[in-house]
Amino acid sequence: MREALRRISAIASKEFIHIRRDPRIMIAVLVMPTIQLLLFAYAISFDVSDVPTVLLDGDRTTASREYLAAYEQSDFFNVVGHVESQKAIDDAFDRSSARIAVMVRPGFGEALARGEKASVAVLVDGSEPNSAQLGQAYATALNQALGRELTFEYLERQAIDPTRAGGITPFIRTWYNPERRSADFLVPGLMVVVIMIVTVQQTAVTLVKEKEQGTFEQIIVSPIRRGELMLGKVSPWVLLGVIDMLVVTLVAIFLFGVPLRGDVLTLGVGTFLFVLCSLGIGLLVSARASSVEVANLVALLISFLPGFMLSGFAFPLHSIPRFLQVVSYAFPGRYMVTITRTVFLKGGSFSILWPEIGALALYAVVSLTLASVLYSRRPD
Amino acid sequence: MESAIQLKALTKRFGSFTAVDAVDLDVRRGEIFGFLGPNGSGKTTTIRMLCGVIAPTSGQATVLGHDAIKDPEAVRRRIGYMSQKFSLFEDLTVDENLRFYAGVYDLTDEKFAARREYILRMADLVGREGELTANLSVGWKQRLALGCATIHEPELIFLDEPTSGVDPTARRHFWELLYELADSGVTLFVTTHYMDEAAHCSRLAFIYNGRLAACGTPGEIRALMTETVLEVDVDDAEAALLALERVSEIREAYMSGAVLHVNVGASSPASVVELLAAAGVTVRGIEVVDPTIEDVFVHLVTQQRAAGETLAATAPEAVAVPNPPVSGSPDA
């Protein structure tokens, strides 16, 4: 046992020297995640405002003017022009000078005056689905609000008590991220993806590199067991992975102003387990890959795509196809994204996050065991 | 005295290919045992089995009294291993490399201090402890690799082509170190394809296509050759070889360094001279020489290959064309 520890620490300290001597590794580990985080966070923004909008007033009554004025006052819509015909709307859409068009049909004012349902048309350019979807939602909300007001006026004019007319209006409030800042939503998820890419990649390469430089054949004829070799090679990366997470967390808090509302210890434990999982995946790749190039490529594929698609980072997991939902359980990203978001935004702690922490712990044990079994059986 | 290595019908098959075929071998303690053969003949596979890295298909291997198959860990503690790749970490300093291997073999601090000093002196690296290994030239790297492989004072060292790609001066220096180790009682198991190095060994085994073709002291090996060998110095070696190959009585003819070696077989020295003259080759010198180890091995390869060809229909792997043994050093 003592001998085994001595051997593991010999490998670990050698590994630290490799890391210290190779500036590329330091850059890859400490600078790259920060840069990636900055790039992704600024490039992928789900904030929508100032959607270019054109208005067509086919009614030209006081009612229609009041209705359209509401769009001009909204921050969400940026009214770029008033047009006279439907043709002009088509042109604006074709030139992409507008993404939303609001048309008030003739007879709008009269219908309201008669207490009937008045209709307007909201046209949305669907080629940019994100703005389109939000645009539609906003327009609907606006209509409902205006509609209610107009209904009230009508009822009062008819001397009916408006409160008795009832009418249920949805009251929407966004929790945890009241301003709907996409940085708050994105950065905690992004941290996970970025850390996963770096750690999987570095560990995927580590064992293969030893083989390529010929030192592996020296090591396997020494008393070192393969499991010890793996542990020794991985242990510096556990530390580096956790440091990495710390750096990215500080960037998230101080640069992006993401609030850290929850339990830091839960986040720490989650991070540690998640780093182990990533290392397990990296070692699995390393145990099988035939060259450094192959290891790099496989590591990128296995960490990047599932990281983005199957972690819930960019797309809510309940909205992806059922098959992929099942697949997503095979990647540790989904558990960790839940942990970071819950701790950062919802102020979560171990009491709610224990299922995810447990899943990560299980995942780490399984992936590391599998990697060491595969690695030991590898016919070298 | 107990054997250092004892092999009984050791066999390794990869699919239908037999890499090592029923090899019997007995290496005595304290000897420099040369394990020779062309590339791909099974030398490295044999060493890997002896170190317990791969399991044999059948047969027995006893190394330093341990069963190498059942108890590889006991074997690994007591052996050293050095390959032509030198297996040093280039981005570590001389000292860090030594320290790493000291940790691997669990040396005490006092032991390490003593071994470190000895190795630095042996490898001529005193004062360069802090230098990155990448900056050392090949000869130094080779000696440092030997130092790392022997840091735990193994009783048996496997050296797999340790001098490959090293200049002649460094090779000589390296062999002096090997002699020193042997003098101190260490058993050395050396593979090489440099035939001049074979003469340095106390005993030799020659492996070809996975089979043991010959085994004995260099003298015994030379005595296997009963035919006359000529050393011929010609102006056009290529034309001379072509001419000689056409005559079936002549057993083999090949380049040994800068001259031709010809096993005249059933022919005679006089007819060789006539033959070369007829082919328009000028003979600058010709003499009968004592067969070298290389002559014997070329002879053995030719015999085996001829036997292999007759068996070709039943044993397809036997016709694999071997690389002939390399003579002398490539830089000579």
Image (spheres, rainbow, N blue to C red):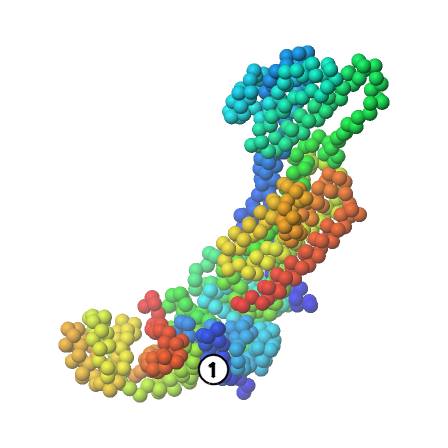
Let me know if residue A306 appears in the view.
yes
**Would residue B17 be found to the left or right of residue A71 on screen?**
left
> Which of the image's four quarters has the N terminus of chain A?
bottom right
| Residue at 73% from the left image edge and 42% from the top image edge | A342
Pick whichever, B82 or B72, lies toward us.
B72
Percent position of residue A117, x then y = 71, 21
Position in image of residue B109 (x %, y %)? 63, 66
Task: Name above or below for residue A72 compared with residue B45.
Answer: above
The quarter of the displayed image where residue B195 is located: bottom left
Closest to the observer, B93 or A286: A286
Rate crowding at label 1 as few (under 14), some (14 to 19) or many (20 or more) other CA atoms within 10 Å: many
> What residue do we see at 76% from left, 19% from top?
A151
Check disc 1 and give the amino acid type.
Answer: Val
Rendered residue at 73%/15% (across/down):
A114
Secondary structure, mark 1, is: strand
Residue pointed to by mark 1 = B23
Residue A276 is left or right of residue A170, and the answer is left
